[in-house]
Image (tube, rainbow, N blue to C red):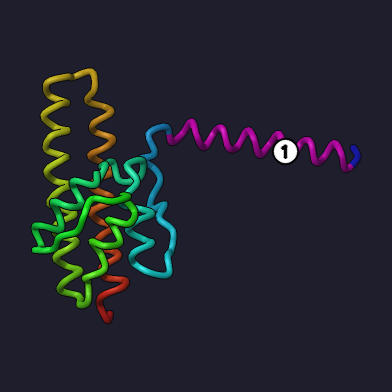
């Protein structure tokens, strides 16, 4: 057996392992925390909470505007990323961040309640909505982690 054969065998084995891991974890429920480390909380939240594929919730521009108005802040409708930065720029203290985390969680709870209603009305879509709700719960825990990591002195 020469080196070429060994390399081919190794690559085939790696492909087989990868397939086995994917088959064992179809719904991603066995994956623990797949969150990365980020240098600042804005990047962390924007990368892990804002994408609906990761958090299960789509935060529209209107949602951002509504969340800001709950905190007596206001800004014009703009590109979603810029609106997010405008929304987050007024955070100066841990208490401010706690308010922002609370507003995010409230909106996530509101949307999860809607998902639950839809899954009751349309039982065939229940697995899809349950996956979104699970992602939202993980995202809420991640918001707590971000708060602890960046705003507490523990």
Taking depth in this image into account, of 150 and 64 the one nearest to the observer is 64
- Find residue 76 and report its horizontal and vertical position in percent: 21, 55
Furthest residue toward bottom: 153
In the rendered image of this protein, does residue 94 appear above or below residue 81?
below
Secondary structure at numbered mark 1: helix
Residue at 44% across / 58% down in the picture? 36
Q: Quadrant of residue 141?
A: bottom left
In the rendered image of this protein, does residue 111 appear above or below residue 97?
above
Say whether residue 20 is magenta.
yes
- Find residue 134 and report its horizontal and vertical position in percent: 26, 41
Residue at 32% across / 57% down in the picture? 82
**Location of the N terminus (image quadrant):** top right
Task: Write the start and end of the magenta stretch as one range.
Answer: 3-25
- Classified by dominant secondary structure, the portion drawn in magenta counts as helix
Residue 8 left/right relative to 20? right
- Find residue 153 and report its horizontal and vertical position in percent: 27, 81
Taking depth in this image into account, of 142 and 47 the one nearest to the observer is 47
Residue at 32% across / 50% down in the picture? 79
- Find residue 111 and report its horizontal and vertical position in percent: 16, 40
**Location of the C terminus (image quadrant):** bottom left
In the rendered image of this protein, does residue 79 appear above or below residue 6?
below
Q: Residues within 10 Å of mark 1 (few under 14, many from 20)?
A: few
Taking depth in this image into account, of 144 and 50 the one nearest to the observer is 50
Residue tagged 1: 11
Residue 105 left/right relative to 49? left
Say whether residue 34 is magenta.
no
In the rendered image of this protein, does residue 61 appear above or below residue 150?
above
Residue at 14% across / 57% down in the picture? 103
Residue 132 left/right relative to 100? right
Taking depth in this image into account, of 29 and 59 the one nearest to the observer is 59
């Amino acid at each position: 057996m020469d080196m070429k054969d060994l390399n081919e065998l190794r690559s085939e084995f790696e492909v087989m392992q990868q397939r086995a891991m994917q088959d064992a974890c179809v719904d991603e429920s066995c994956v623990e925390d797949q969150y990365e480390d980020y240098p600042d909380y804005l990047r962390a939240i924007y990368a892990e909470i804002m994408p609906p594929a990761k958090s299960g919730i789509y935060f529209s521009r209107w949602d951002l505007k509504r969340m800001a108005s709950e905190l007596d802040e206001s800004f014009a409708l703009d590109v979603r990323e810029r609106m997010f930065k405008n929304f987050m720029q007024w955070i100066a203290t841990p208490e401010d961040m706690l308010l922002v985390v609370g507003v995010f969680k409230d909106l996530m709870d509101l949307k999860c309640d809607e998902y639950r209603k839809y899954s009751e009305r349309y039982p065939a879509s229940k697995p899809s909505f349950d996956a979104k709700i699970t992602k939202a719960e993980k995202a809420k825990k991640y918001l707590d982690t971000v708060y602890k990591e960046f705003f507490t002195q523990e």
